[in-house]
Image (tube, helix red, strand yellow):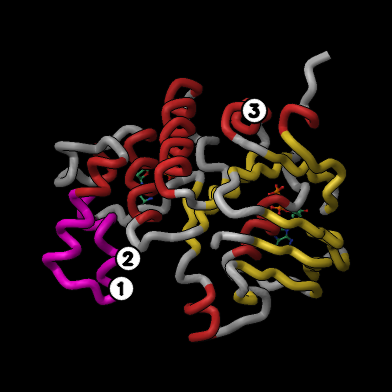
Amino acid sequence: DGVITISNVKKLFNTKSGTLTAVDDVNLQINEGEIFGVIGYSGAGKSTLIRMLNGLESPTSGMVDVNGKVISNSKGSDLRRARQKISMIFQHFNLLWSRTVRENISFPLEIAGVGKRERDKRVDELIELVGLDGRGDAYPSQLSGGQKQRVGIARALANEPEVLLCDEATSALDPQTTDAILELLVDINKRMGLTIVLITHEMHVIRKICHRVAVMEEGRVVELGDVLDVFKQP
Ligand code: ADP
Ligand code: ADP
């Protein structure tokens, strides 16, 4: 589970100055339990690519398959079913600012129809897992950036996903906080065996936690392999 297949995926955008190719014929297979990084400069197509993995964008052509379910061009209840086991965390955390830490983490469980008693139990476990003990009743505005991302991670894990997508998840954080969050992601990957796909413009992030990496330039994957091979030190 948690296997991702990206086949001949292209994404074009129509802009005022013509058609722009954001993702240009990408083929990737991401394995179960792997921490897979996509690195590239701004505008390389990373964000568009990762958004196609959970149906936030649809490819213009090609196919995205996660856990044997086709994500690309699915809609409505088909898409909801296909993305049930896929979660995402974001650069700016995307928390609900008028709700507490507990309420933020509980939110996906409420949507999934999980009963109150079970929700409370899950939220307690998640708060402990991400190291937010004692902060459950705080509001996001009372938390540091690293703590906000811990809430984002706990919320993303609430429905026991098989795939966690990370969209520049440490780019708004200072280096020390970045390292702590990356260590948490490694810990979660080991404990739960879930597949992690992250996009970043920072080499350090890739080197620290990824098993394999794809380098993107102008919508294309220009290098792919084990991190140690792709970023060999001279
Ligand atoms: P990255 O995440 O690597 O910075 P993006 O995927 O955000 O790259 O963007 C790739 C290219 O697609 C850029 O040229 C960007 O301007 C363009 N792009 C992204 N989203 C849209 C959109 N919704 N409409 C038009 N162009 C877009
Ligand atoms: P970052 O969290 O990376 O500093 P954001 O733009 O996400 O950048 O948020 C900056 C701050 O503004 C947050 O810490 C939060 O307190 C506040 N904030 C962001 N979005 C909202 C919102 N929709 N409603 C209320 N406050 C918000």
Circle 1: element type: helix
Q: Which residue is drawn at the image coordinates 46% and 46% (left, top)? A: 92
Quickly name the residue at label 2: 108
Quadrant assignment, res 4: bottom right
Q: Which residues are magenta?
A: 99-124
Q: Mark 3 belongs to which amino acid? A: Arg
Magenta stretch, main secondary structure, is helix
Quickly name the residue at label 3: 207
Quadrant assignment, res 132: top left
Circle 2: element type: helix
Residue 26 located within the stretch drawn in magenta? no
Ligand 1 closer than 8 Å to label 3 CB: no
Residue neighbourhood size for the residue with mark 3, other residues' Cα within 10 Å, grouped as few (<14), some (14–19), many (≥20): some
* Left or right: where 115 falls relative to 54: left
- Residue 148's mark? none
- Asked whether disc 1 touches disc 3, contact meaning CB atoms under 8 Å apart, the reply is no
Nearer the camera: disc 3 or disc 2:
3
